[in-house]
Amino acid sequence: MTELLTVRDLVVRFRTLGLFKALLNRVRDPFIDAVLGVSFDLKAGETYGLAGESGSGKTTLGRAIIGLVNAYTGSIRFEGTELVGLDDGAYKAVRRHVSMMFQDPVASLSPRLTVRSLLTEPFRIHGLGDGDLNEKARRLLEMVGLNESFFGRFPHELSGGQARRVGVARALSLSPKLIIADEPTAGLDVSVQGEVLNLMARLQRELGLTYLVITHNLPVIRHVSDRLAIMYLGRFVEMGRTEAIFRRPLHPYTKALIAAVPEPDPDRRRDIIKLEGEIPSLANRPTGCEFHTRCPFAQSRCRAEAPAPRELEQGHMVRCHFPLATPTADAA
Amino acid sequence: MSAQLSDALLSATDIRRREGFLGQVRRFRRDPLGVLGLALVTVIVLAAVFADVISPYAPAAIDVKIRLAAPSLDHLLGTDQLGRDVFTRVLYGGRIALEVASLCISVSLGIGLALGMLAGYGPRWLDNGVILVCDAVRSFPTIMFALAVVTLVGPSLETIELIIIIATIPGYARIVRTQTLSLKTNEFILAERARGAGGIPVLAIHVMPKVIGPLLILGSMDVPVVVTIEAGLSFLGLGVRPPTPSWGSILNDGYAFIRNTPWLVIAGGVPLILTTLGFTFLGEALRDIIDPKLRKV
Amino acid sequence: MDVVLSIRDLTVDFATPRGMVHALREVSLDVPRNKIVGIVGESGCGKSTLIGAAMGLLANNAVVRGGRALFEDRDVLTMSDSELRAIRGQRISMVFQDPMTSLNPVLSIAQLMTDIQYRDRASSPARKLARAVDMLRQVGIPDPEQRIDHYPFQFSGGMRQRIAIAMALLMNPSLLIADEPTTALDVTLEAQIIHLLRELHGKLQTTVLFVSHNLGLIAELCDEVVVMYAGEVVEHGPVRALFHDARHPYTRALLECDPARIAKSNRELPTIPGEVPNLIQLPAGCVFHPRCSRAFEPCPVRPPQPVAVGAGHAARCYLLSHD
């Protein structure tokens, strides 16, 4: 498989205070790094998952790829084209091939536009207004399992599942290669959630799409992604094949995240909580391994020295001094 | 609390959004003050538009034989110190007042809308600049500002209009800016940007429809303010030049001749009061129907 | 059995410009003392209306068509406003979904927590403060003596939800209603809060009505479960019976849909076809029949009645009476 997207050492930095306020309050470093040194590759046709809690930088990473926030340093290459540093006009060409689905199925649709306008507008933005736009819109609706009768409806007249389908149709409108889906199941009931995910899987098979799925929902990402990265405070702490990560998580944080998902089985109630405390503030990154403040296995080395990413198995990376399992120990 | 309880019941705004135009008309009819406002506004506007049809006199026709006459069938509101028919002058005065109001408000709404959206959506320096200018203009008391400009330029209808436009732009611009700022981070705006839409289309297609409704309501509620400013300046002799009739100059005449007749003051004052009441009631009723959240502003 | 909250055949409509929304129909449920009862259902199932009825907080356009909501043997629906106020916050208290908006931002935690003790005229302010500090310690706020003078915004989301729980439990209520208390939180914090609720329940013997759409949380926390669909209780029973031997097709389908239950990684996820019915024009017969894979002749004709299938376990389905 070929690499569709290559991200190297990406840093997204936000200013927390204006120049004057920072000077007045004598804040030396009025910046936070929402994404810090992230590198990964996206292969054509795969589904890549980005998982983490709020504040982990997963949404910012997705937005940096599509150019909604600017990268500070690092490189994002899409089909060989460097995206970091592109101006808006040049980015527009990229956005034909990369589209994004946002969290809230209803709120991400412009409220005063009908479904028909919502679907035809992407063509106009990109100067593709010729040809029968209605026909194009109708085909898009059919692809996501809706029909023409939805043309005249406004977003608030749609159910969550229908709105999500319209969102998928919009994302598909310019025949993109990559779709970045930010929490594609947020706000949907369990019974509808499966429908949307199945639809996305079907479209991937039919159209050869590549997905970057951003979510905090581990049970969902487990079923839909081929490979997965776990983010904590803007870094990848573990990365590998989804199945391998769920079978044997190497990072204590990954393990705790998986364990925190309650099992729908009253006979398997947990008595201990794996993880105490909350995510530290990005403005106050802990020293050493940034997870040591919450890690049940933290030792003095973790507090002092930041672990480098290590590849313990083929394609399975972890950023931890004391990974939970080593391939040798496992083999023995 | 109500948000927590509303999964099955449609929330109040939901119902409002879903009831459609007919439902809004029905709700409007149930608001007696709103209906009164609409009636007053309709009468005032019709009277101004058809002033030349309604009245047989010319507004500036002088007839000294009957100066300061009391109301009669010939002269419904009597005559002034030059024997001009006051009823006619009130009708034509309304024309001036509404002309000034509609022109000023539409121009300043347009400029305010554009400035506000640019400030809210555009770069930080532009925002800071627009806000600085707006606050500077708003920090002048309107009347002082008007007096200064009139002293410099000389009184005329155009001067009044210019003053009113400059004085009302900042208010609109600030409101539009605030709304744009809060819309800017909404997901549907992000979604459009991610799709490659540029700044101007985003503003025109997605932001403007959301801000324009409340803005129009505010504009209609500002009509009495503008009418009052025009009348006030004309009362002071700094506005519409005689012999053009204006409610302000009629009031001023009435003030000068109040010992001779009360009718002039009444004829100048009552339309002002009715206009204020009419547009305010109508504006409030529309606001409650279209956007109940604005009630707090 | 000592029942704290007993809802009997409650039917509630909402008058809207588009017609009557039939939010609840003949809903009955019991919350026994010292138990945790879970209500599970998807959006539009009526769980929020049910809570509103139990607290006497139904919206103005609500019409109670019939039934009672008995809290400690008194009908909440016929109480006067002052009687209701005497109960709310004292005898029944509530924890909301969003800890960011459910605490008044301009009051310190100390003020918030002494204010809710206003009915206790006998205690001195110092005594009330001490009680508040003690409760904050019980919900796991570190150094409560200092932290109590802070304002809500100075706490993180998880800590705020802990404070909300402390406030709800402060007056030692007979019933704690928790409405999706972890939906706004991350999964590790969710686990902490659920753990806390369980621990406090063990220690204080509080009766809890726990509302959620998350089956995992219900399984983890509750003793009994009520499954609601489109304004009806379709199945209720002890938690084990419900998760291991669900009898209503909807409950079964819901359990199958939960991706956390599917052990094998699978691209094709199970779903329930169709949409939740419009609450203004309900389908005739069983509300679930248009989406039910096992519907047969009687289903579209008349609504089924609950059929007992075990101790305290009943479901509304014709399949059960035809066996």
Image: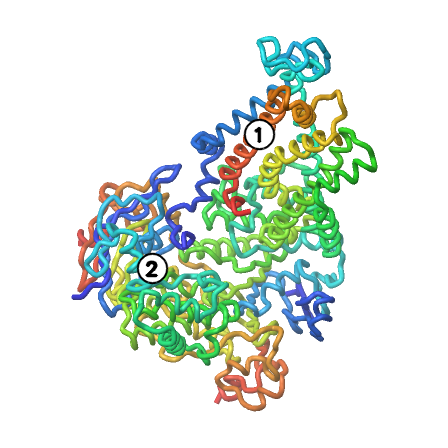
Kind of residue at disc 2 = Val
In the rendered view, would you say B283 is above or below A101? above
Quick check: do tags 2 and 1 share a chain? no
Disc 1 is attached to a residue of which chain?
B
In the rendered view, would you say C305 is above or below A212? above
Disc 2 is attached to a residue of which chain?
C
**Residue A301, horizontal then vertical, whole percent:** 58, 90
Kind of residue at disc 1 = Ile
In the rendered view, would you say A265 is above or below A166? below
Residue occupying image coordinates x 58% and y 46% = A110
Residue occupying image coordinates x 27% and y 68% = C207
Q: Can you say which quadrant of the picture contains the N terminus of chain B? A: bottom left
**Residue C128, horizontal then vertical, whole percent:** 36, 73
Residue B273 marker? 1
Residue occupying image coordinates x 41% and y 45% = B10
**Residue C162, horizontal then vertical, whole percent:** 42, 71
Residue A229 visible in the snapshot: yes
SS of the residue at dot 1?
helix
User: In the orientation shown, which residue stands out farthest toward the right?
Assistant: B152
Residue occupying image coordinates x 74% and y 33% = B160
- What residue sits right under mark 2 in the picture? C40
Disc 2 versus disc 1: nearer the observer: 1
Pointer 1: residues within 10 angstroms few (<14), some, or many (20+)?
A: few
